[in-house]
Image: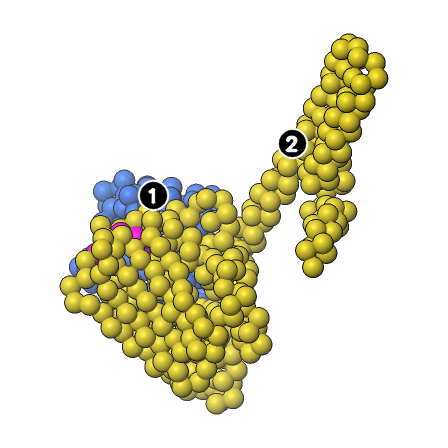
């Protein structure tokens, strides 16, 4: 298996193609060439010194090899720069596309709002059911676009979340309230156990809402029918700790080290829950780190998961 | 009846928001660019301005700045309604004197009306 893996790593042609680079722009290929040249140079220097014992020839070879290595290094730097450029362009594209997508999505959302409010009595039951479908799907797209925008901000280092002094208890209650409908639809009960007189924490309120939204949403979504989600807030040293516990599908052991990676979605949840971008926890981690907090989880497959985070007290 | 001026360059949004607010009992006048909007506010002196940021002719920042610099319009509350979401933009408009900053895609019209009501009541 490891040999197969090494060969896979060494498959430069495919890797370079994936990054849209030619072989001579591809850093990994060029590194291999450098290694070969270095080994060859050492061997030939050895042979020449043994055979001729003339220091001038050795010096000449060393100068020649250095020149070649210099050129290859230059190519590597250029290749890396191109890669960085491609990456930057991708981030910018995501940013622009997301912004452009938001305008028509808002148009749809508000037109639905208008139909919902104004003509509710004129719509037949079937029509209003279909309107709800449009509404839900429109909201899914807005959420996706928001996730992509947050991702591009994280990648550009422009998360721009100014810390504020906020009450975690207050925000958690708000997010729980917003999730009461979806929890009811999923037959899941939400419980909040909050220590009295919790101190204020230092984090951006929008960012905190984003984290709680993602985590509570996940807990409900990945709990099978008739489950419970318990949210516990407590003071721990100089932080406030939040634990979100579900008795859902859990995270398989093999997937646990990848759970905070961008776009990662665990195999067991893909089976019955296709909705989701794999960005929620990546974004959550970035927000918590931005606030100098900590985040983690314990999980057992088919038993449930506890996600936790700790934010410093202001 | 309370009057609202909605400065927004997207006609579909103008229509839906305008209609929704009218159903809620407001009189709504729409302007398609910053310059027209500014002139309209100065003439009509509405109870509230809903202002987009990316606008032709004069952008929302400029409109806001001029409204707040004019003695006759500086007390009219301005709600920013945009899809820009950079912290710098939010801070800039708030420091220029905007009352609230709402990201369009994240709000239902009911919520926007609620904010409008709160703002007008507070200003009275």
On the picture, is A16 further left or further right than B62? right
Horizontal and vertical percent position of residue A57 = 80, 13
- Position of residue B7 relative to residue B110, above or below, is above
The image quadrant that residue A181 belongs to is: bottom left
Along the line of sight, the residue nearer the viewer: A274 or B54: A274
The image quadrant that residue B27 belongs to is: bottom left
Horizontal and vertical percent position of residue A91 = 56, 48
Along the line of sight, the residue nearer the viewer: A98 or A57: A57
Horizontal and vertical percent position of residue A139 = 48, 69
Mark 1 or 2: the one toward you? 2
Give the labeled residue for mark 1.
B92
Provide the chain ID for the residue under circle 2.
A
Along the line of sight, the residue nearer the viewer: A6 or B21: A6
On the picture, is A204 further left or further right than A50? left
Instruction: Name, please, the residue furthest toward the right.
Output: A51
Give the labeled residue for mark 2.
A77
Horizontal and vertical percent position of residue B69 = 27, 40
Q: What's drawn in magenta, residue-wise?
A: A200-205
Q: Please say whether residue A53 is visible from this viewpoint.
A: yes
Q: Colour of chain B?
A: blue
The colour scheme used here is: by chain
- Helix or strand or loop: what does disc 2 sit on? helix
On the picture, is A236 further left or further right than A297? left
């Amino acid at each position: 298996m490891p040999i197969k893996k090494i060969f896979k790593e060494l498959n430069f042609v495919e890797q370079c193609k994936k990054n849209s680079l030619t072989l001579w722009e591809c850093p990994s290929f060029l590194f291999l060439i450098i290694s070969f040249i270095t080994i060859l140079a050492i061997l030939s220097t050895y042979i020449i010194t043994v055979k001729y014992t003339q220091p001038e020839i050795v010096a000449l070879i060393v100068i020649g090899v250095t020149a070649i290595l210099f050129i290859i290094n230059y190519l590597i730097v250029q290749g890396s720069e191109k890669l960085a450029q491609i990456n930057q362009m991708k981030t910018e594209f995501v940013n622009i596309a997301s912004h452009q997508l938001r305008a028509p999505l808002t148009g749809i959302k508000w037109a639905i709002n208008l139909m919902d409010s104004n003509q509710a009595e004129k719509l037949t039951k079937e029509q209003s059911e279909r309107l709800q479908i449009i509404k839900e799907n429109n909201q899914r797209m807005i959420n996706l676009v928001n996730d992509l925008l947050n991702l591009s901000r994280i990648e550009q280092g422009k998360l721009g979340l100014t810390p504020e002094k906020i009450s975690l208890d207050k925000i958690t209650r708000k997010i729980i309230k917003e999730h009461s409908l979806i929890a009811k639809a999923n037959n899941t009960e939400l419980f909040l156990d909050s220590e009295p007189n919790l101190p204020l924490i230092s984090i951006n309120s929008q960012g905190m809402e984003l984290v709680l939204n993602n985590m509570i949403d996940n807990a409900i979504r990945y709990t099978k029918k008739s489950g419970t989600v318990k949210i516990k807030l407590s003071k721990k040293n100089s932080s406030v700790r939040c634990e979100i516990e579900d008795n859902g599908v859990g995270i398989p052991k093999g997937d646990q080290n990848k759970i905070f990676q961008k776009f990662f979605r665990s195999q067991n949840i893909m089976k019955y829950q296709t909705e989701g971008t794999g960005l929620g926890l990546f974004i959550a981690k970035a927000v918590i780190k931005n606030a100098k907090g900590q985040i983690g989880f314990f999980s057992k497959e088919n038993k449930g998961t506890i996600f936790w985070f700790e934010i410093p007290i202001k | 009846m309370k009057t609202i001026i909605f400065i927004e360059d997207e006609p579909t949004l103008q229509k839906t928001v305008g209609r929704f607010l009218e159903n809620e009992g407001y009189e709504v006048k729409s302007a398609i660019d910053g310059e027209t909007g500014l002139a309209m506010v100065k003439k009509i002196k509405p109870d509230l301005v809903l202002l987009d940021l990316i606008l032709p002719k004069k952008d929302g920042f400029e409109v806001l700045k001029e409204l707040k610099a004019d003695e006759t319009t500086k007390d009219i509350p301005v709600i920013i309604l945009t899809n820009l979401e950079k912290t710098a933009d939010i801070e800039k408009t708030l420091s220029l004197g905007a009352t609230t900053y709402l990201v369009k895609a994240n709000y239902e019209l009911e919520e926007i009306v609620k904010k409008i009501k709160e703002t007008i009541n507070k200003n009275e």
